[in-house]
Image (tube, grey):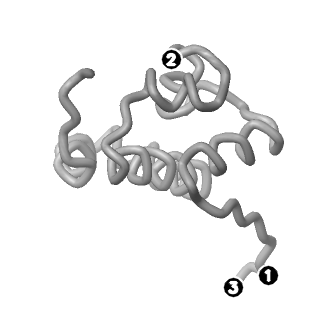
């Protein structure tokens, strides 16, 4: 298994880059979902390979999802949530 770093450390290091920070903030909801998937996977000390095996896909698909380079279906997000022993919630909120 590849060494898992603390999600907080990775996020802190990444957000130090101003260009990365601007893009991250512009894609707020998408990154919140990605962040929650990565955080949960790391809490479970699960590698991308292990998550992929539980979902029935390849590690590259999990990598694309976690890097924001995939457009997963609602069904695949539900499968990932199940594999991570988590609930998937999707909601619409009125704009402030």
Q: Do the residues labelled 3 and 2 touch (CB within 8 Å)?
A: no
Question: Which mark is on residue 94?
Answer: 1
Q: Which residue is drawn at 48% across and 23% down?
A: 63
* Foreground disc of the pair 2, 1: 2
- Mark found first going from the N terminus, 2 or 1: 2
Q: Where is residue 31 in the image (x, y as percent from the top left)?
A: 52, 49
- Mark found first going from the N terminus, 3 or 2: 2
Question: Which mark is on residue 80?
Answer: none
State which quarter of the image contains the C terminus: bottom right
Question: Would residue 37 be found to the left or right of residue 88 on screen?
Answer: left
- What whole-number distance in Å separates the C-alpha atoms at marks 3 and 2? 38 Å
Q: For mark 2, does the 10 Å Cα neighbourhood hold few (<14), some (14 to 19), or many (20 or more) residues?
A: some
Q: In what element is the residue under mark 1?
A: loop
The quadrant where residue 49 appears: top left
Q: Do the residues labelled 3 and 1 touch (CB within 8 Å)?
A: yes
Q: Which of 93 and 20 is in front in this view?
A: 93
Q: Kindly identify which residue carries mark 2.
A: 59
Q: Where is residue 19 in the image (x, y as percent from the top left)?
A: 33, 39
Q: Kindly identify which residue carries mark 3.
A: 96
Position of 1 relative to 91 (above/below): above
């Amino acid at each position: 298994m590849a060494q898992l770093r603390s999600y907080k450390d990775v996020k802190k290091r990444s957000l130090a880059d101003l260009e990365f920070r601007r893009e991250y903030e512009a894609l707020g909801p998408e990154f919140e979902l990605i962040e929650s998937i990565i955080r949960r996977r790391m809490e479970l000390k699960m590698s991308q390979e292990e998550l992929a095996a539980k979902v029935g896909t390849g590690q590259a698909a999990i990598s694309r999802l976690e890097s924001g380079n995939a457009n997963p279906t609602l069904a695949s997000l539900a499968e990932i949530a199940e594999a991570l022993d988590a609930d998937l919630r999707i909601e619409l909120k009125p704009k402030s």
